[in-house]
Image: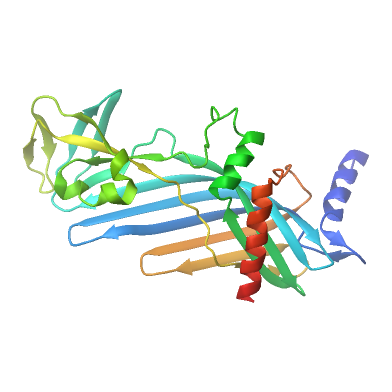
Amino acid sequence: MSPAKTLVIGLGSFSILAGCGKPTPGGYWEGKATAKEVAMKDQFKTLSRSAEAEFWFTVNWSPSDSTGIVAGEGEALYEAELKVEHLPKVTVPVPGGSVKFEPEVGGKLTDLDPKRKFPIVGVLSLQGESGTLLLQKANAKSVDSFLQHKWAADTNQQDGSEQPLQFTIRADPGVSGGLEVEYGKSEGKSEGKSEGEGKAKAKAGIDAKVDASVQVITIPMTPFTPFSDSPAKVEKRPGGPYVADFEEKGKNYSIVWSAKQMGGEKREPPKLTPEMEQQIQQLKKMLQSKH
Protein backbone atom coordinates (compact mmCIF):
# COMPACT_ATOMS: atom_id res chain seq x y z
CA MET A 1 0.00 0.00 0.00
CA SER A 2 1.37 3.43 -0.93
CA PRO A 3 2.22 5.99 1.79
CA ALA A 4 -0.45 8.32 0.36
CA LYS A 5 -3.21 5.71 0.71
CA THR A 6 -2.02 4.84 4.19
CA LEU A 7 -2.23 8.53 5.16
CA VAL A 8 -5.79 8.86 3.80
CA ILE A 9 -6.96 5.79 5.71
CA GLY A 10 -5.25 7.04 8.85
CA LEU A 11 -6.93 10.43 8.62
CA GLY A 12 -10.31 8.80 7.98
CA SER A 13 -9.94 6.60 11.03
CA PHE A 14 -8.77 9.51 13.18
CA SER A 15 -11.90 11.50 12.40
CA ILE A 16 -14.12 9.01 14.24
CA LEU A 17 -11.88 8.54 17.28
CA ALA A 18 -11.72 10.66 20.37
CA GLY A 19 -9.80 10.34 23.65
CA CYS A 20 -8.31 6.89 24.47
CA GLY A 21 -9.09 5.63 20.97
CA LYS A 22 -12.83 5.38 21.60
CA PRO A 23 -15.00 5.56 18.46
CA THR A 24 -17.31 8.54 18.10
CA PRO A 25 -20.11 9.34 15.62
CA GLY A 26 -18.12 12.27 14.25
CA GLY A 27 -17.18 12.63 10.60
CA TYR A 28 -18.87 11.94 7.30
CA TRP A 29 -22.29 10.23 6.92
CA GLU A 30 -24.52 9.27 3.98
CA GLY A 31 -28.19 8.37 3.90
CA LYS A 32 -31.43 7.89 1.99
CA ALA A 33 -35.01 8.94 2.74
CA THR A 34 -38.48 8.19 1.42
CA ALA A 35 -41.54 10.26 2.28
CA LYS A 36 -45.06 9.46 1.02
CA GLU A 37 -48.33 11.21 1.71
CA VAL A 38 -51.96 11.11 0.63
CA ALA A 39 -52.50 14.85 0.80
CA MET A 40 -56.20 14.72 -0.07
CA LYS A 41 -58.78 11.95 -0.37
CA ASP A 42 -62.55 12.08 -0.84
CA GLN A 43 -65.20 9.97 -2.50
CA PHE A 44 -63.89 10.63 -6.02
CA LYS A 45 -60.38 12.10 -5.78
CA THR A 46 -57.06 11.00 -4.31
CA LEU A 47 -54.02 13.27 -4.33
CA SER A 48 -50.75 11.54 -3.45
CA ARG A 49 -47.20 12.82 -3.42
CA SER A 50 -43.76 11.44 -2.56
CA ALA A 51 -40.10 12.34 -2.27
CA GLU A 52 -37.07 10.08 -2.70
CA ALA A 53 -33.95 11.73 -1.28
CA GLU A 54 -30.25 11.02 -0.98
CA PHE A 55 -28.25 13.09 1.47
CA TRP A 56 -24.91 13.48 3.21
CA PHE A 57 -23.71 15.36 6.24
CA THR A 58 -20.81 15.71 8.62
CA VAL A 59 -20.98 15.54 12.40
CA ASN A 60 -18.82 18.00 14.34
CA TRP A 61 -18.51 15.95 17.52
CA SER A 62 -18.03 17.39 21.01
CA PRO A 63 -16.94 14.73 23.55
CA SER A 64 -17.50 17.15 26.45
CA ASP A 65 -21.29 17.05 26.12
CA SER A 66 -21.66 13.97 23.84
CA THR A 67 -23.36 16.09 21.20
CA GLY A 68 -22.62 16.61 17.53
CA ILE A 69 -23.63 19.45 15.22
CA VAL A 70 -24.83 18.25 11.82
CA ALA A 71 -24.49 20.11 8.51
CA GLY A 72 -24.85 18.73 5.00
CA GLU A 73 -26.86 18.63 1.79
CA GLY A 74 -29.61 16.56 0.24
CA GLU A 75 -31.30 16.13 -3.12
CA ALA A 76 -34.91 14.96 -3.44
CA LEU A 77 -36.83 13.67 -6.46
CA TYR A 78 -40.52 14.59 -6.16
CA GLU A 79 -43.62 12.94 -7.61
CA ALA A 80 -47.30 13.83 -7.31
CA GLU A 81 -50.48 12.54 -8.93
CA LEU A 82 -54.19 13.25 -8.69
CA LYS A 83 -56.47 10.28 -9.38
CA VAL A 84 -60.10 10.98 -10.25
CA GLU A 85 -62.68 8.30 -11.06
CA HIS A 86 -64.19 7.96 -14.55
CA LEU A 87 -61.77 10.27 -16.35
CA PRO A 88 -60.73 9.35 -19.92
CA LYS A 89 -57.24 9.47 -21.35
CA VAL A 90 -56.48 12.81 -22.97
CA THR A 91 -53.61 14.80 -24.47
CA VAL A 92 -53.83 18.57 -24.11
CA PRO A 93 -51.62 20.98 -26.07
CA VAL A 94 -49.77 23.51 -23.92
CA PRO A 95 -47.16 26.13 -24.78
CA GLY A 96 -43.98 24.32 -25.81
CA GLY A 97 -45.53 20.85 -26.06
CA SER A 98 -48.39 18.85 -24.62
CA VAL A 99 -49.50 17.16 -21.42
CA LYS A 100 -50.74 13.55 -21.48
CA PHE A 101 -53.15 12.32 -18.83
CA GLU A 102 -53.66 8.57 -18.54
CA PRO A 103 -57.14 7.25 -17.62
CA GLU A 104 -58.32 8.52 -14.23
CA VAL A 105 -55.35 10.89 -13.91
CA GLY A 106 -56.64 14.38 -13.23
CA GLY A 107 -53.31 15.98 -12.45
CA LYS A 108 -49.62 15.24 -12.15
CA LEU A 109 -46.23 16.78 -11.62
CA THR A 110 -45.02 18.22 -14.93
CA ASP A 111 -41.95 20.10 -13.75
CA LEU A 112 -39.11 19.62 -16.25
CA ASP A 113 -36.72 19.04 -13.36
CA PRO A 114 -38.55 17.63 -10.31
CA LYS A 115 -35.35 17.47 -8.26
CA ARG A 116 -34.43 19.99 -5.58
CA LYS A 117 -31.21 20.34 -3.59
CA PHE A 118 -31.37 21.63 -0.05
CA PRO A 119 -29.08 22.17 2.95
CA ILE A 120 -29.49 19.98 6.03
CA VAL A 121 -28.95 20.79 9.69
CA GLY A 122 -29.30 18.58 12.74
CA VAL A 123 -28.16 17.47 16.16
CA LEU A 124 -26.81 14.08 17.24
CA SER A 125 -26.79 13.13 20.92
CA LEU A 126 -25.36 10.01 22.57
CA GLN A 127 -25.71 8.25 25.89
CA GLY A 128 -23.09 5.53 25.82
CA GLU A 129 -23.07 3.95 22.35
CA SER A 130 -26.69 4.73 21.50
CA GLY A 131 -28.64 7.93 21.12
CA THR A 132 -30.72 10.04 18.79
CA LEU A 133 -30.28 12.04 15.58
CA LEU A 134 -32.64 14.83 14.57
CA LEU A 135 -32.36 16.05 10.97
CA GLN A 136 -34.19 18.90 9.27
CA LYS A 137 -34.20 20.62 5.96
CA ALA A 138 -32.88 24.12 6.67
CA ASN A 139 -35.77 26.55 7.00
CA ALA A 140 -36.47 29.22 4.40
CA LYS A 141 -34.51 31.99 6.13
CA SER A 142 -31.52 29.70 6.59
CA VAL A 143 -31.69 28.68 2.96
CA ASP A 144 -31.85 32.27 1.72
CA SER A 145 -28.70 33.14 3.62
CA PHE A 146 -27.00 29.89 2.65
CA LEU A 147 -27.65 30.46 -1.04
CA GLN A 148 -25.81 33.77 -0.92
CA HIS A 149 -22.71 31.75 -0.12
CA LYS A 150 -23.14 28.68 -2.33
CA TRP A 151 -26.01 28.29 -4.78
CA ALA A 152 -26.83 31.82 -5.92
CA ALA A 153 -24.76 31.48 -9.09
CA ASP A 154 -26.37 28.14 -9.97
CA THR A 155 -29.95 29.31 -9.42
CA ASN A 156 -29.79 32.84 -10.90
CA GLN A 157 -30.02 34.30 -7.40
CA GLN A 158 -33.16 32.26 -6.71
CA ASP A 159 -33.71 29.83 -3.89
CA GLY A 160 -33.37 26.55 -5.77
CA SER A 161 -34.37 24.36 -2.84
CA GLU A 162 -37.70 26.16 -2.32
CA GLN A 163 -38.50 26.86 -5.97
CA PRO A 164 -42.07 25.60 -6.48
CA LEU A 165 -42.66 22.46 -8.52
CA GLN A 166 -45.08 22.67 -11.45
CA PHE A 167 -48.23 20.61 -10.87
CA THR A 168 -50.67 20.50 -13.81
CA ILE A 169 -54.36 19.56 -13.51
CA ARG A 170 -57.40 19.39 -15.72
CA ALA A 171 -59.40 22.54 -15.14
CA ASP A 172 -62.78 20.82 -14.86
CA PRO A 173 -64.39 21.87 -11.52
CA GLY A 174 -64.85 18.23 -10.59
CA VAL A 175 -61.08 17.77 -10.84
CA SER A 176 -59.57 21.07 -9.76
CA GLY A 177 -62.06 21.89 -7.01
CA GLY A 178 -60.19 22.32 -3.74
CA LEU A 179 -56.72 21.96 -5.23
CA GLU A 180 -56.28 25.68 -5.86
CA VAL A 181 -56.62 26.17 -2.12
CA GLU A 182 -54.22 23.32 -1.38
CA TYR A 183 -51.41 24.55 -3.63
CA GLY A 184 -52.09 28.27 -4.04
CA LYS A 185 -55.29 29.40 -5.72
CA SER A 186 -54.05 32.90 -6.47
CA GLU A 187 -51.11 31.50 -8.42
CA GLY A 188 -53.01 28.92 -10.47
CA LYS A 189 -53.10 29.83 -14.15
CA SER A 190 -54.51 28.39 -17.34
CA GLU A 191 -51.78 27.00 -19.60
CA GLY A 192 -53.64 25.80 -22.66
CA LYS A 193 -56.58 23.97 -24.19
CA SER A 194 -57.13 21.34 -26.83
CA GLU A 195 -57.66 22.61 -30.35
CA GLY A 196 -60.51 21.02 -32.32
CA GLU A 197 -61.90 17.65 -31.29
CA GLY A 198 -59.42 15.35 -29.60
CA LYS A 199 -59.89 11.68 -28.93
CA ALA A 200 -59.45 9.92 -25.64
CA LYS A 201 -59.72 6.32 -24.62
CA ALA A 202 -62.12 5.87 -21.73
CA LYS A 203 -61.59 3.42 -18.90
CA ALA A 204 -63.77 0.83 -20.62
CA GLY A 205 -61.60 1.01 -23.73
CA ILE A 206 -64.19 2.80 -25.85
CA ASP A 207 -63.17 5.80 -27.93
CA ALA A 208 -64.75 8.96 -26.57
CA LYS A 209 -64.59 12.54 -27.80
CA VAL A 210 -63.12 15.24 -25.61
CA ASP A 211 -64.62 18.70 -25.45
CA ALA A 212 -62.51 21.18 -27.43
CA SER A 213 -62.51 23.52 -24.45
CA VAL A 214 -60.57 21.13 -22.18
CA GLN A 215 -58.10 23.28 -20.26
CA VAL A 216 -55.29 22.68 -17.84
CA ILE A 217 -54.13 24.74 -14.89
CA THR A 218 -50.65 24.81 -13.38
CA ILE A 219 -50.41 25.13 -9.62
CA PRO A 220 -47.16 25.68 -7.71
CA MET A 221 -46.35 22.85 -5.31
CA THR A 222 -43.87 23.67 -2.57
CA PRO A 223 -41.15 21.01 -2.14
CA PHE A 224 -41.72 19.32 1.20
CA THR A 225 -39.18 17.91 3.62
CA PRO A 226 -38.41 14.17 3.62
CA PHE A 227 -37.70 14.34 7.37
CA SER A 228 -39.84 14.42 10.50
CA ASP A 229 -39.75 16.46 13.69
CA SER A 230 -39.05 13.24 15.58
CA PRO A 231 -35.49 11.90 16.01
CA ALA A 232 -34.00 8.71 14.62
CA LYS A 233 -32.48 6.02 16.78
CA VAL A 234 -28.67 5.89 16.67
CA GLU A 235 -26.66 2.78 17.47
CA LYS A 236 -23.11 1.59 17.02
CA ARG A 237 -22.72 -1.67 15.18
CA PRO A 238 -20.41 -4.17 16.92
CA GLY A 239 -16.94 -3.53 15.54
CA GLY A 240 -18.43 -1.17 12.96
CA PRO A 241 -19.73 2.37 12.42
CA TYR A 242 -22.62 4.28 13.92
CA VAL A 243 -25.94 4.05 12.07
CA ALA A 244 -29.27 5.87 12.34
CA ASP A 245 -32.71 4.52 11.45
CA PHE A 246 -36.07 6.25 11.42
CA GLU A 247 -39.57 5.07 10.52
CA GLU A 248 -42.85 6.86 11.14
CA LYS A 249 -46.19 5.87 9.69
CA GLY A 250 -49.57 7.51 10.07
CA LYS A 251 -53.01 7.07 8.57
CA ASN A 252 -52.11 8.99 5.40
CA TYR A 253 -48.31 9.27 5.39
CA SER A 254 -45.02 7.46 5.94
CA ILE A 255 -41.46 8.70 6.45
CA VAL A 256 -38.52 6.31 6.39
CA TRP A 257 -34.86 7.26 6.39
CA SER A 258 -31.53 5.83 7.39
CA ALA A 259 -27.94 7.05 7.51
CA LYS A 260 -24.56 5.45 8.07
CA GLN A 261 -21.23 6.80 9.27
CA MET A 262 -18.77 6.43 6.41
CA GLY A 263 -15.49 7.37 8.09
CA GLY A 264 -13.27 10.16 6.84
CA GLU A 265 -14.78 13.43 5.65
CA LYS A 266 -15.25 13.11 1.90
CA ARG A 267 -17.05 16.42 1.32
CA GLU A 268 -16.74 19.87 2.75
CA PRO A 269 -19.78 20.66 4.89
CA PRO A 270 -21.68 23.88 4.19
CA LYS A 271 -20.67 26.85 6.28
CA LEU A 272 -23.28 27.47 8.94
CA THR A 273 -25.05 30.77 8.62
CA PRO A 274 -26.39 32.60 11.70
CA GLU A 275 -29.88 31.44 10.73
CA MET A 276 -28.71 27.82 10.52
CA GLU A 277 -27.02 28.09 13.92
CA GLN A 278 -30.26 29.45 15.37
CA GLN A 279 -32.19 26.54 13.86
CA ILE A 280 -29.68 24.09 15.37
CA GLN A 281 -30.18 25.63 18.82
CA GLN A 282 -33.92 25.11 18.39
CA LEU A 283 -33.27 21.48 17.43
CA LYS A 284 -31.18 21.01 20.57
CA LYS A 285 -34.07 22.22 22.70
CA MET A 286 -36.48 20.01 20.75
CA LEU A 287 -34.23 17.00 21.25
CA GLN A 288 -33.87 17.66 24.98
CA SER A 289 -37.65 17.89 25.37
CA LYS A 290 -38.04 14.43 23.81
CA HIS A 291 -35.61 12.76 26.23
What scheme was used to colour the molecule?
Answer: rainbow
Residue 268 drawn above or below residue 42: above
Q: Residue at x 17, y 40 (%)?
A: 89
The residue lying furthest to the top in this view is 96
Residue 36: x and y in percent read: 41, 57
Residue 187 drawn above or below residue 155: below
Q: Residue at x 58, y 40 (%)?
A: 144
User: Would you say residue 104 is visible in this rendering?
Assistant: no
Residue 62: x and y in percent read: 81, 62
Q: Quadrant of the C terminus?
A: bottom right
- Answer with left or right where residue 110 lies relative to residue 237: left
Residue 151 drawn above or below residue 60: above
- Answer with left or right where residue 281 lies relative to residue 211: right
Q: Residue at x 60, y 46 (%)?
A: 142
Residue 93 drawn above or below residue 239: above
Q: Residue at x 65, y 50 (%)?
A: 276
User: Would you say residue 147 is visible in this rendering?
Assistant: yes
Q: Quadrant of the N terminus?
A: top right
User: In terms of image quadrants, where is residue 128?
Assistant: bottom right
Residue 261: x and y in percent read: 71, 57
User: In terms of image quadrants, where is residue 47?
Assistant: bottom left
- Answer with left or right where residue 117 lies relative to residue 206: right
Residue 24: x and y in percent read: 80, 63
Number of marks present in the image shown: 0
